[in-house]
Image (tube, rainbow, N blue to C red):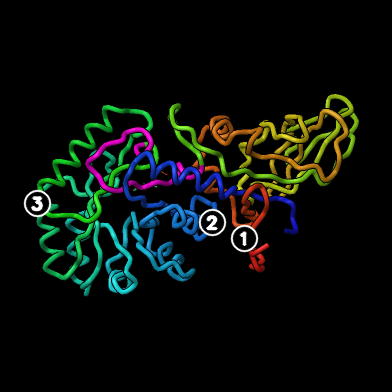
């Protein structure tokens, strides 16, 4: 690793969380690894999930499915979002399952040769994103897909408020049951639980859960204790003392009021540390230090309580700065912070606290 800005993923903790989900749900586990495994590395997360007995991987799009196939993942793979009909023959050939979510999508699909295509019927029970609302349309679609040689192997829906509204979730589940039963079709895969529902709803209608953010230790539940596998660090590379009346960074938005120690860190918004972080605190060597001045593209300045050593590790989030707190301070959710961490940040994977591999932009051998 050259630039000392990195993310650490503790594979033991990650796998603990996945095993926990399997144990609690008692169902098959579909690991949701869209957006490069929420930024943690798609293939790395896939490998951990497989180790823990996951049966299927889910991604957002055709591109993400192909990325995983190109990286050598040959197992069960489901796209969760829209696919263009002209991609379907290729997806059928690669054994990638797709959602059928509306009558118009199905008519587009039927104009292609989608013989052998694996299909999961997506039904909408309240999210109003994609999915069939109407049981007649759903049933006609199933018949038509079957007649054209598709393998209708699954049915699923998505909860809008699994973490905040039990009664809405219960209504969605009822609607899902009704729609599933209206088909009279036997589905190999029936799934509705996202991470939060997997951990807390514990319904017995579905036979698989879609587990995403929970792998990274995020849950609204107080009962289930997950581990926090992800942390991010940089390094104090330059420390200087400034007299009163000096300004810091673009726009000169911060001015020293006395003699102050200022540190520079090689991380910025191009790494995912968005400008909204100005004024928030980072953790260095026992101290919480504020970001002063604007966050630049590649560098950030902090005010130090005393002279601190160049080379000190700076925690951006981790054991001293929970990602949940950071998200709250930024008015967002951990998902968004994770997904914004750019490819430029080296991912280091650890086991028993020891680095075992890394992924970096230089495409160097990743085995340490
Ligand atoms: C992203 C996504 C999930 C995973 O949600 P988590 O809250 O991360 O567990 C599950 N299902 C669908 C349809 C999704 O888009």
User: Which badge, 2 or 3, comes first in the chain's sequence?
Assistant: 2
Residue 36: x and y in percent read 50, 56
| Residue at (25, 44) in percent of width and height | 206
Q: Callout 2: helix, strand or loop?
A: loop
Q: Which residue is mark 2?
A: 41
What's the magenta region? Answer: 197-216
**Quarter in which the N terminus is drawn:** bottom right
Horizontally, is 286 left or right of 333 in the view? right
Q: Which residue is mark 3?
A: 184
Q: Give the numbered dot on residue 81.
A: none
- For residue 84, what is the image quadrant? bottom left
Task: State yes or no: discs 2 and 1 in contact (Cβ < 8 Å).
Answer: yes
Q: Does 198 sit above or below residue 279?
A: below
* View extreme (top): residue: 257
State yes or no: Cβ of the residue under disc 3 lies below 8 Å from any atom of ligand 1.
Answer: no
| Residue at (38, 65) in percent of width and height | 75
Disc tally is 3
Residue 189 belongs to the span the image colors magenta: no
For the residue carrying disc 1, how many other residues have a C-alpha within 10 Å: few (<14), some (14-19), or many (20+)?
A: many
Q: Does 96 sit above or below residue 232?
A: below
User: Which badge, 2 or 1, comes first in the chain's sequence?
Assistant: 2
Nearer to me, 73 or 299: 73
**Quarter in which the C terminus is drawn:** bottom right
For the residue carrying disc 3, how many other residues have a C-alpha within 10 Å: few (<14), some (14-19), or many (20+)?
A: few
| Residue at (13, 41) in percent of width and height | 178
Residue 309: x and y in percent read 86, 40
Q: Give the numbered dot on residue 359.
A: 1
For the residue carrying disc 2, how many other residues have a C-alpha within 10 Å: few (<14), some (14-19), or many (20+)?
A: some
- For residue 359, what is the image quadrant? bottom right
Horizontally, is 179 left or right of 72 in the view? left
């Amino acid at each position: 690793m050259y630039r000392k800005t990195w993310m650490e993923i503790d594979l033991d903790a990650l796998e603990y969380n996945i095993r926990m989900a399997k144990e609690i749900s008692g169902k098959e586990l579909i690991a949701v690894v869209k957006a490069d495994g929420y930024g943690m590395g798609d293939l790395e997360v896939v490998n951990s999930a497989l180790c823990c007995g996951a049966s299927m991987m889910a991604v957002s799009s055709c591109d993400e499915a192909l990325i995983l196939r190109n990286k050598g993942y040959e197992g069960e793979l489901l796209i969760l979002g829209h696919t263009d009909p002209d991609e379907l023959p290729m997806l059928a050939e690669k054994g990638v399952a797709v959602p059928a979510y509306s009558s118009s999508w199905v008519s587009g699909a039927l104009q292609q040769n989608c013989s052998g295509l694996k299909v999961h019927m997506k039904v909408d029970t309240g999210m109003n994103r994609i999915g069939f609302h109407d049981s007649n349309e759903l049933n006609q679609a199933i018949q038509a897909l079957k007649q054209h040689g598709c393998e209708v192997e699954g049915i699923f829906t998505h909860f809008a408020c699994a973490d905040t509204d039990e009664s809405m979730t219960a209504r969605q589940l009822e609607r899902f049951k009704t729609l599933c039963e209206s088909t009279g079709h036997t589905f190999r895969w029936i799934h509705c639980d996202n991470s939060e529902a997997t951990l807390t709803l514990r319904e017995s209608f579905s036979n698989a859960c879609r587990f995403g953010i929970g792998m990274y230790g995020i849950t609204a539940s107080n009962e289930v204790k997950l581990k926090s596998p992800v942390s991010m660090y940089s390094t104090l590379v330059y420390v200087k003392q400034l007299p009163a009346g000096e300004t810091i960074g673009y726009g000169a938005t911060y001015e020293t009021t006395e003699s102050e120690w200022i540190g520079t860190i090689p991380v910025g918004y191009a790494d995912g540390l968005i400008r909204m972080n100005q004024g928030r605190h980072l953790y260095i060597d026992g101290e919480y230090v504020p970001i002063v001045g604007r966050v630049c593209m590649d560098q950030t300045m902090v005010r130090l309580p005393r002279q601190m050593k160049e080379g000190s590790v700076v925690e951006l989030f981790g054991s001293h700065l929970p990602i949940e707190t950071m998200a709250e301070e930024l008015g967002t959710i951990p998902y968004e912070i994770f997904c914004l961490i750019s490819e430029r940040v080296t991912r280091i994977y650890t086991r028993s606290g020891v680095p075992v591999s890394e992924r970096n932009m230089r495409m160097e051998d990743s085995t340490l």
